[in-house]
Image (cartoon, rainbow, N blue to C red):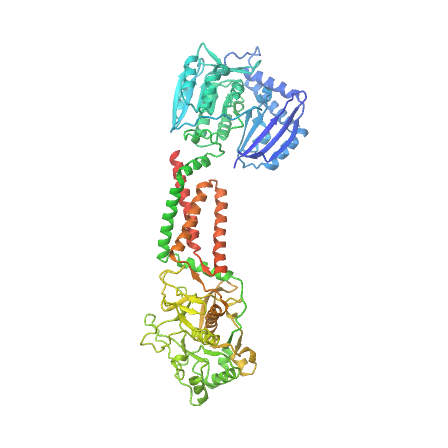
Amino acid sequence: MGKLVILKLGEGNFEQGFPVTLQIGDENVRPSVEITGALPPNPEILRDYYRWQSIYRNLRLPSRPIGLPKELKQAASLEDCQQVTEEFKIRFNTWLAADSFRPIREKWLEKLMPADNIRVLLQTKDLRLQKLPWHLWDLLERYPQAEIALSAPAYEQVNRITTTSDKIKILAILGNSQGIDTKADQALLNSLPNTDITFLVEPQCQDLTEQLWEQHWQILFFAGHSSTQETNEIGKIYINQTESLTISQLKYALKKAVERGLQLAIFNSCDGLGLAREFASLQIPEIIVMREPVPDRVAQQFLKYFLSAFAQGNSLYLAVREARERLQGLENQFPCATWLPVICQNPAEMPLNWGELFRDTPNLPTSLSKTTAVKRITNRLGFSLLLLTSMVMTGILTGVRYLGVMQPLELGAFDQLLRLRPPEKPDSRLLIVTVTEEDVQAQKQEKPQGSLSDKSLAQLLEKLETYQPQVIGLDIYRDYPVSKDYPALAERMRKSDRFVGVCQLSDSQAGKPGVKPPPEVSPKGLGFSDIAIDSDNVVRRHLLALTPSPSSPCTASYALNVQLALRYLYTKGIKLQFTPDGAWQLGKQGFKPIEAHAGGYQEVDAFGHQILLNYRFSGSPDAIAPHITLGQVLTGKLNANAVKGRIVIIGTTAETFGDYWLTPYTTPKGKLQAIPGVFLQAEMVSQLLSAALDGKPLLWTWPLWGEVIWIWGWCFLGGLLTAYLHRFIYLSLAAGIAIISLYGSCFIFFIAYSCWVPLIPAMLALGGNILIVTTYLNIKFQNKF
């Protein structure tokens, strides 16, 4: 946003000094800073200026003045003018560096940055102060995007008529051309794009008046001779060889022109401050004049540079500054050319932009042309178009999502949400007995066929059953019979209603033949160990049951963890029931199976009866429940209270057997954490128990229509933000807040309601629609120019 600086010089004179008030703020808002200071008495400033003016006006230059008195009998030289110019510049900046003016200077330096786009308005009714070349102030030269304009202390905004036109309406008056070349001005104007120009060449007064009355003009241009009568501060233009007019003589016609949309007057002629002072009472928004007599070539070059910069989209202030500074190349021939152009501004109006002029919005306040243009385009954009773009974007994203393109990203977001959940206490209803690498080495003399020998298993089961566990699950394959040396073990496995063995289903597609169950265990005491894994080998789903293949060596229909949970829940009075649609029911908790398209899963193999695995995270996935090693149990370190009434799960953690599974959680190094299968079975048992006994909700997803509405809502929000926030910084801030809000909403849904809400599709919809609407507005904006 541009900055507006107002420098008010109050009643005073060069003999007593001037009170000064400085106001600083953003464009089109109230000033945020105000401070007072003073310019000290300095009559020499005025004396030196008049000395410079006298020498300048007596230079032999091809100028556009008529009737200016020559004060010196002998013509001044260029060297004289250059010398007095430097002397005045030093004295002028010394005056502005006075102690009484220092608070103004310091506040300016404190509040304004060199990169700021700054408009400076000098408000004073003293013509002598207006004549001074304020652009020489060394403070202004530090700010390359700043330009100063003159303004009257009294002003008001005129309600102008809004007209519709594809071209800028310009009334160009080419007045008395005696001794000058106004055809060059005419040629420059004709080269302007998007203009409708009417030229009045040395018109009669009546012709000029009628043109001002009868049509809607946006720019008034005058080239020719003009002058200011210093005694009464009246400006005069010479419209033909015989007639001259003051602004007051055109008062009613010009007033009507302002009401009909006249916004800018350019007097490319001499000594125009008197013209500007008279125009101020008509409340025209902006005027460009020459403060002193202007050589013909300087006038033409200024017009060329100004129109080029202005028509390319620069603000009027920056266009004037660029054109004024480019005149420096002529100062070897035409001294002080850069002193001449000056803007006179009505403070009630905002500065113009070329694009606004032919887009029929003369009364719309703005500080940046592109912002204004985008506002008007978005006003036409309308709710219906925003609705259409958001619906199309949502449809595209939903289709792409349905094809599974976003699944890796969505699963990654799901994992992150899991990791952000607060930790839970370990499940005290479970006890895990682990067979470690050390335990395997200790059994070598017994020559076990797996990780657990018959002898060690017999001793383990004997100790455990002594402490009355609720159920024991063996998560170790035993596809071979018990040795004849341990008949008690075989008998216990055959008759115990607490013992559940494990087997593996065959999978012809994956080339897995399956693993037979222990021969001693009845089919009712079996559970399969199969796990549903995703394409990235991470376990996020919980396989509860399926129908085994007739050729499978394992005929168990329920998972090992399900068998353990059902036996435990049966003692609590909870039995597995089925709803009319075939879903599971344990107590008050329903277990609706996931489908091929569920949440972030698209075309997932939803075989059997699967649900999402809601990990019980206790700082680490392997901290799901209390655990003890086989060696510790066999050496008598097992506490009876740790076993009684609990579910005991026996499994190996020895890495040589490769029973490890990736989880959504990460290690301190950032890699996905793998846990032994026995701990994974414990996670699944705990999920079933927590759902049936504790009322802990299962992870679930919205139906497809709910997810589509959610994605569309964020998509539509992105369009709204872009349509009504036109500054990049505001749009970026709002988009950032929206993304944070989206992430926070998904996190709250996940934590509070265990609902997996689409995060990635909604984020892409939000950002994608911002990009689409921004692109549309930019194309429309470019077409308008």
> Is 142 located above or below residue 705 in the figure?
above
Which quadrant of the structure image shows residue 782? top left
Q: Position of residue 526 (x, y in %)?
A: 40, 78
Q: Position of residue 377 (x, y in %)?
A: 41, 37
Residue in the image at 34% along x and 70% along y: 510
Residue 421 vs residue 595, the one in the foreground? 595
> Is 615 located above or below residue 104 in the figure?
below
Q: Position of residue 335 (x, y in %)?
A: 53, 21
Instruction: Tell me if I can see residue 14 in this picture.
Output: yes
Q: Quadrant of the C terminus?
A: top left
> Is 350 located above or below residue 513 in the figure?
above
Residue in the image at 66% along x and 27% along y: 38
Residue 397 vs residue 142, the one in the foreground? 397
Residue in the image at 44% along x and 32% along y: 313
How many marks do you count on the picture?
Answer: 0
Instruction: Tell me if I can see residue 301 in this picture.
Output: no
Which quadrant of the structure image shows residue 204? top left
Residue 741 vs residue 630, the one in the foreground? 741
Q: Position of residue 592 (x, y in %)?
A: 40, 65
